[in-house]
C-alpha cells in the first residue's frame, strides 16, 4: 500500500519532487482587470556574455527567437497565426539581460501563449532564418549604425570607448568581423548555456486565469537545465580614464553630434543614486524642457534640438519620452548628450556643456532648484509603468537590483528625505570633467582636432539679438579651456568603426 | 478643410455618450461648446495620471503660401514660448513642479499637444492650457531663437535616409498640392523662419481657434466637474473664419521617378507611391486600399514571403495608406540588402500590384485582416495615457467619436471585389511615383 502511495505521489508531482520545475519565486504575477495580458521572461544574460570574437551572439540568438521559426511552425506560419490577433512578441538584448516580451488581448490568450511559449522553449534555429537575421544584424552595424543616425553612432562610440576591453565594450549587435564569424552552432550553444530553467524569471500581468500560471510553470520547466546558481560573469571594473580623451568619427554630416561621459559607481541599489537623480533631473532630464542644459543651450541660444544628461543608460530609440524598462546593469556611466549642432558651433557647444557641468561640481545646486527638482521627480514617477507590460518590466528590474521596495516607491521615499547638502555632496563625489571620454561625429574632424589641441577661441555668431548677459557669458564659454593632448584625440572614418 | 462653425448662438452644448457596443471599449463623453470647441472626456481608473490633449486641425497641408512651408510645425514650437500671464519660464517651472511629461507633434494634417501629469493638477493645467491657446504672446528674440531649434531638428533628422526618401517622394509626386512639402518644410524656408515673425502671428490668429480644436482628457477625474471647468476656462475663446484656399493638384498624367544619392554606405531604399483620395470613414475606396496594402505588401503576404523570407533581398517591406485630410498617396516601401536587386524587387512589387487587379484575395486572409485591424486598435489602448495618444489620429479626421465605429463598419464590409476595384482604380502606372535611394559604395 505504501509503495503504491509513493508511486502515486511520484506520478502526480514528478517535477516538484525532483526539483525540475519553475518555482514560485521565479514567477512575477500582476493581476488586474486589463484585457491586455502581458508576458515578460527575463534571462540574466546579454551581450556582456558574448564570447570573445563572437560579439553580437546574444543579440543574434535573441533575434532567432523573436523572428525565427519554432520546431512546430516556420516563421511565415507564425506570422499568419499571430496576424488575426494583432499580437506579437519581441526580444530585447542589453548588456546583462535578455527579455522576451509579448502582449495579447485575453480573447486570444490561449492561441498566443502557445506561439510565445514555443518561441522561447523550442526555437528551430533554421538555417534560412539564421542567414536572414545574421545578414540583417551585419547591416545594422556596418551600414545603419555607421551612417544612418549620427546621434546613435556617437552614443555607441562613447559607450564602447568608456568600456574598452570590458564585456560592455561593444554594441549589443556586435562588430562587423565578429558577426561574420558567428555560426548556427554558436547560437544553439549560447541558447543552451544561457536560457536555462534555474535563471529565468517569468512575469504575467493582466486578467489571466489561474490555469495560465500552472501551464507556465509546467511548460517552462523544459528550458535547458543549467547549473543551479550560475550567475553572470563577474564584471571587471571599467578602465581608468585619464584626462580628456576624444574619439572623432569622420563622416559627411549635416551637423556635429556630441556625447561625453565617464563611469559612475552608482545604480538603483545605492543610496547616493537618488541624490544624484535629483541633480540629473534638473541638469538634463531626457527630452524635457526642465533640463537645465536644454534651457541654456537650446532655449536661450537655439543651438540645437536638445541637450540632456543621464545617470542610467537610456536605450534606443531616443525619440521616446520615457525610458523602456529592462536595460538594468550593474555598472552605469554618466553621459551628456548634445544633439547635432551646426558645425561652426561645435567647439562652443562642447565647451558650454562641460563648463555647465563643472559649474555644478564647483557650486552645487541652489536650494530653489533643489526643491523644484524634488517636486519634479516625486510627481514625474506617476508617468512611469503605465501599461501592464511596463509594470512587469519595472518589477523585473527591481529584482535585478535586489531592491527591498519597488524602485518607483523608493524614488518617492528617498527623494523626499534628501537635503540639499546630500545632493551637492553626491555631485562632488561622483562627477568630474577632467577624466572623460568625448565622442564626436562630424566632418572635417582634423580641423576640430587642431582647434581642441590649441584651445582656439570659438566665438558664436547669432543672426538675431541676444541679451547682454548671454553675450557676456559667451565670451567666457568661447575661451573655456579644455585640456586635451593631441595623442588623446583619435579620428576614425565612419566606415571603420566597429570593425 | 478648416471646419466652419455655423451654429453660433443656437446650440450651447451638444453632449453625446458612448453607445454600449462601440469598437472603442471605454465610456466617453463628447461635447461641443458654443464656440465650436469639441471636448472628449474618457474617465478611466489608473494610478492617478491624467492625459490632456489639444488637437488642432492644422498641419503642413494648410501652408498654402509660397515660402511658408514648415510653419505649422514651427508654430507648434512657439506654443511653448509663453503668454503675458504665464511667460515661458513660469509655464515651464509650473509643469516641472507637477512632474509633467509633455510635448507636441505636427504632421501634414494636424497638430497635437499633450501633457501627462498627476490628476490633482488638472485644473491648474487647464488654466494654463486655455491661456496659451487663447493668449499666446511671444517677443521677436524668442521667436528667432526658436527658429534655430527647428533648424536643429532638421539637422538631426537629416542622416536618416527614410526622411530623405519622404522629402523626395512628396516633392516629386506632387506639383501644386500643399502635400508637396514635408511637415519640417523646405530647408530654405526653415532658414528664413527668423524673418517671419509677423506671419507667425497671422498663423496663430487663423488656425488656433476653438472650432479647429478638440480637447481630449483621459484618466482619473470626475467628468461632470471637468466639463464645468472647461466651460469656465474656454468659453471666452472666440471662433475665427479663415478658410485656406487649397491649390488643386492637377491630375497626374504619367509616371514620375527620381533618385537620391546618399552620402555614405547605406542600404538601398525603394519607394513606390500612387495618388489616392482623402480619408473618410465611409469611403469604400479608402478602406479597400488599407486591405489591399496589408494583404499584398504586409507581413503575411506572398510578396513578403518571397522577398524577405525566401530570397532575402529585402529587410523592410511595408505598405502605408495613412489617412489624410486631402488627396494623398498610397505607398509601398522597401529597404533592400543589395543595390543590384533593385530591378528585381521593383518588378516583383509592380507585378503584385498588377495581380491585385485580377486575383481576388482569399476569404480567410480577408477575415484575418479584419480581425487584425480590430485587435490592433484595441492593443494600442494599453493605458489611459495611450488611449489619449491614439485618439488624435482619428479625431482629426472625423466629426464625432461614433465615426470610429463607422470606419470599422466600412472596413468590415470590404469584399474581395472591392479590393480588386481599388487596385484597378489606383494602382495605375500614370498615377505612380518611384523614388530610389542608394548609398556610396
Image: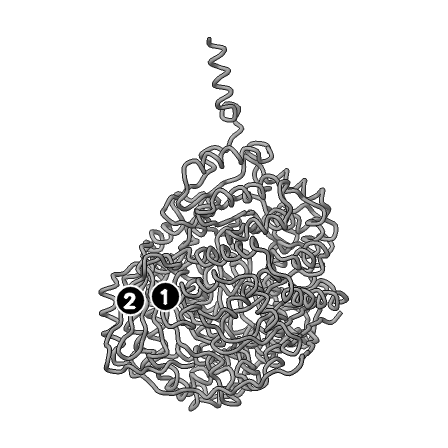
Report the disc number at residue B16.
Answer: 2
On the rendered image, what quadrant is the C terminus of chain A found in? Answer: bottom right
Q: State the residue at coordinates (57%, 71%).
A: B330
User: What residue is pinned by disc 1?
Assistant: B402
Residue A347 visible: no
Q: Are marks 1 and 2 in contact (CB under 8 Å)?
A: yes
Chain letter, disc 2 residue? B
| Residue B44 figure quarter | bottom left
In the image as oriented, which residue stretches furthest toward the top? A1
Q: Position of residue B166 (x, y in %)?
A: 59, 74
Under tag 2, what secondary structure? strand
Residue A173 vertical position relative to residue B243 in the rendered view, above or below: above
Left or right of residue B202, residue A319 in this image: right
Number of numbered labels in the structure image = 2
What's the colour scheme?
one colour
Residue A193 vertical position relative to residue B293 in the rendered view, above or below: above
Q: Looking at the image, is mark 1 or mark 2 earlier in the sequence?
A: 2
Residue A402 vertical position relative to residue A459 in the rendered view, above or below: above
Q: Position of residue B78 (x, y in %)?
A: 42, 80
Taking depth in this image into account, of B238 and A407 the one nearest to the observer is B238
Taking depth in this image into account, of B225 and A382 the one nearest to the observer is B225
Q: Residues within 10 Å of mark 2 (few under 14, many from 20)?
A: some
Mark 1 → mark 2, Cα distance in angstroms: 10 Å
Q: State the residue at coordinates (43%, 79%).
A: B58
Residue A100 vertical position relative to residue B62 in the rendered view, above or below: above
Q: Residues within 10 Å of mark 1 (few under 14, many from 20)?
A: some
Amino acid at each position: 500500500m505504501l509503495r503504491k502511495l509513493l508511486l502515486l505521489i511520484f506520478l502526480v508531482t514528478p517535477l516538484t519532487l525532483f526539483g525540475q520545475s519553475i518555482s514560485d519565486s521565479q514567477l512575477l504575477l500582476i493581476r488586474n482587470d486589463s484585457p491586455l495580458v502581458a508576458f515578460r521572461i527575463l534571462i540574466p544574460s546579454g551581450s556582456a556574455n558574448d564570447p570573445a570574437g563572437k560579439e553580437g551572439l546574444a543579440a543574434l540568438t535573441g533575434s532567432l527567437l523573436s523572428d525565427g521559426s519554432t520546431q512546430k511552425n516556420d516563421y511565415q506560419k507564425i506570422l499568419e497565426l499571430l496576424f488575426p490577433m494583432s499580437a506579437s512578441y519581441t526580444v530585447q538584448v542589453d548588456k546583462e539581460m535578455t527579455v522576451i516580451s509579448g502582449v495579447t488581448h485575453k480573447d486570444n490568450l490561449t492561441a498566443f501563449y502557445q506561439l510565445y511559449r514555443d518561441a522561447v522553449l523550442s526555437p528551430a534555429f533554421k538555417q534560412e532564418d539564421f542567414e536572414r537575421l545574421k545578414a540583417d544584424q551585419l547591416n545594422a552595424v556596418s551600414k545603419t549604425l555607421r551612417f544612418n543616425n549620427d546621434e546613435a553612432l556617437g552614443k555607441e562610440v562613447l559607450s564602447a570607448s568608456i568600456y574598452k576591453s570590458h564585456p560592455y565594450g561593444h554594441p549589443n549587435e556586435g562588430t562587423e568581423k565578429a558577426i561574420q564569424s558567428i555560426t548556427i552552432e554558436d547560437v544553439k550553444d549560447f541558447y543552451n548555456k544561457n536560457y536555462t530553467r534555474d535563471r529565468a524569471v517569468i512575469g504575467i500581468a493582466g486578467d489571466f486565469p489561474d490555469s495560465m500560471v500552472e501551464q507556465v510553470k509546467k511548460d517552462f520547466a523544459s528550458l535547458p537545465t543549467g547549473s543551479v546558481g550560475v550567475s553572470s560573469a563577474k564584471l571587471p571594473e571599467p578602465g581608468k580614464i585619464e584626462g580628456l580623451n576624444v574619439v572623432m568619427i569622420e563622416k559627411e554630416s549635416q551637423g556635429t553630434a556630441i556625447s561625453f561621459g565617464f563611469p559612475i559607481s552608482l545604480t538603483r541599489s545605492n543610496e547616493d543614486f537618488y541624490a544624484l537623480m535629483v541633480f540629473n533631473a534638473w541638469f538634463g532630464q531626457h527630452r524635457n524642457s526642465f533640463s537645465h542644459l536644454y534651457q541654456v543651450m537650446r532655449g536661450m541660444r537655439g543651438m540645437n534640438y536638445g541637450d540632456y544628461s543621464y545617470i542610467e543608460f537610456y536605450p534606443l530609440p531616443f525619440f521616446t519620452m520615457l525610458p523602456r524598462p529592462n536595460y538594468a546593469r550593474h555598472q552605469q556611466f554618466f553621459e551628456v548628450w548634445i544633439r547635432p549642432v551646426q558645425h561652426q558651433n561645435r567647439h562652443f557647444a562642447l565647451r558650454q556643456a562641460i563648463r555647465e557641468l563643472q559649474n555644478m561640481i564647483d557650486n552645487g545646486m541652489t536650494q530653489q532648484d533643489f526643491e523644484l527638482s524634488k517636486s519634479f521627480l516625486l510627481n514625474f514617477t506617476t508617468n512611469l509603468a503605465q501599461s501592464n507590460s511596463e509594470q512587469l518590466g519595472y518589477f523585473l528590474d527591481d529584482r535585478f537590483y535586489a531592491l527591498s521596495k519597488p524602485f518607483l516607491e523608493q524614488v518617492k521615499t528617498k527623494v523626499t528625505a534628501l537635503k540639499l547638502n546630500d545632493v551637492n555632496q553626491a555631485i562632488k563625489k561622483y562627477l568630474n570633467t577632467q577624466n572623460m571620454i568625448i565622442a564626436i561625429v562630424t566632418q572635417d574632424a582634423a580641423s576640430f582636432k587642431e582647434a581642441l589641441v590649441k584651445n582656439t577661441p570659438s566665438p558664436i555668431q547669432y543672426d538675431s539679438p541676444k541679451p547682454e548677459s548671454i553675450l557676456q557669458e559667451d565670451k567666457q564659454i568661447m575661451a573655456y579651456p579644455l585640456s586635451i593632448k593631441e595623442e588623446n584625440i583619435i579620428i576614425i572614418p565612419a566606415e571603420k568603426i566597429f570593425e | 478643410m478648416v471646419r466652419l462653425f455655423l451654429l453660433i448662438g443656437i446650440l450651447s452644448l451638444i453632449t453625446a455618450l458612448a453607445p454600449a457596443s462601440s469598437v472603442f471599449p471605454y465610456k466617453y463623453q463628447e461635447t461641443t461648446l458654443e464656440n465650436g470647441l469639441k471636448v472628449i472626456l474618457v474617465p478611466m481608473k489608473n494610478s492617478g495620471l491624467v492625459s490632456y490633449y489639444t488637437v488642432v486641425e492644422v498641419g503642413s497641408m494648410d501652408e498654402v503660401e509660397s515660402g511658408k512651408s514648415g510653419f505649422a510645425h514651427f508654430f507648434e514650437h512657439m506654443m511653448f514660448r509663453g503668454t503675458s500671464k504665464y511667460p515661458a519660464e513660469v509655464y515651464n517651472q509650473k509643469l516641472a513642479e507637477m512632474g509633467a511629461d509633455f510635448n507636441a507633434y505636427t504632421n501634414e494634417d494636424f497638430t497635437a499637444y499633450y501633457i501627462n501629469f498627476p490628476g490633482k493638477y488638472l485644473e491648474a493645467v487647464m488654466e494654463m492650457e486655455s491661456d496659451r491657446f487663447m493668449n499666446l504672446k511671444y517677443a521677436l528674440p524668442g521667436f528667432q531663437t526658436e527658429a534655430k531649434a527647428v533648424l536643429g531638428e532638421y539637422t538631426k533628422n537629416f542622416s536618416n535616409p527614410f526622411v530623405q526618401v519622404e522629402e523626395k517622394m512628396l516633392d516629386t509626386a506632387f506639383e501644386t498640392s500643399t502635400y508637396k512639402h514635408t511637415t519640417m518644410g523646405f530647408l530654405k524656408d526653415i532658414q528664413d523662419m527668423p524673418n517671419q515673425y509677423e506671419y507667425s502671428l497671422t498663423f496663430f490668429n487663423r488656425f488656433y481657434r476653438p472650432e479647429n480644436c478638440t480637447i481630449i482628457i483621459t484618466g482619473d477625474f470626475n467628468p461632470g466637474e471637468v466639463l464645468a471647468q472647461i466651460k469656465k476656462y474656454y468659453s471666452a475663446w472666440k471662433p475665427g473664419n479663415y478658410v485656406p484656399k487649397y491649390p488643386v493638384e492637377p491630375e497626374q498624367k504619367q509616371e514620375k521617378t527620381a533618385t537620391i544619392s546618399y552620402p555614405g554606405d547605406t542600404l538601398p531604399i525603394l519607394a513606390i507611391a500612387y495618388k489616392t483620395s482623402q480619408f473618410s470613414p465611409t469611403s469604400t475606396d479608402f478602406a479597400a486600399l488599407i486591405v489591399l496594402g496589408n494583404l499584398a505588401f504586409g507581413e503575411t503576404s506572398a510578396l513578403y514571403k518571397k522577398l524577405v523570407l525566401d530570397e532575402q533581398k529585402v529587410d523592410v517591406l511595408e505598405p502605408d495608406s495613412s489617412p489624410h485630410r486631402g488627396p494623398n498617396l498610397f505607398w509601398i516601401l522597401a529597404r533592400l540588402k543589395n543595390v543590384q536587386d533593385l530591378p528585381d524587387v521593383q518588378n516583383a512589387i509592380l507585378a503584385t500590384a498588377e495581380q491585385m487587379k485580377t486575383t481576388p484575395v482569399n476569404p480567410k486572409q480577408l477575415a484575418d485582416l479584419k480581425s487584425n485591424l480590430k485587435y490592433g486598435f484595441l492593443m494600442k489602448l494599453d493605458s489611459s495615457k495611450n488611449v489619449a495618444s491614439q485618439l488624435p489620429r482619428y479625431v482629426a479626421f472625423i466629426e464625432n467619436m461614433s465615426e470610429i465605429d463607422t470606419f470599422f463598419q466600412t472596413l468590415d464590409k470590404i469584399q474581395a471585389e472591392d479590393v480588386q476595384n481599388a487596385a484597378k482604380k489606383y494602382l495605375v502606372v500614370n498615377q505612380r511615383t518611384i523614388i530610389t535611394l542608394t548609398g556610396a559604395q
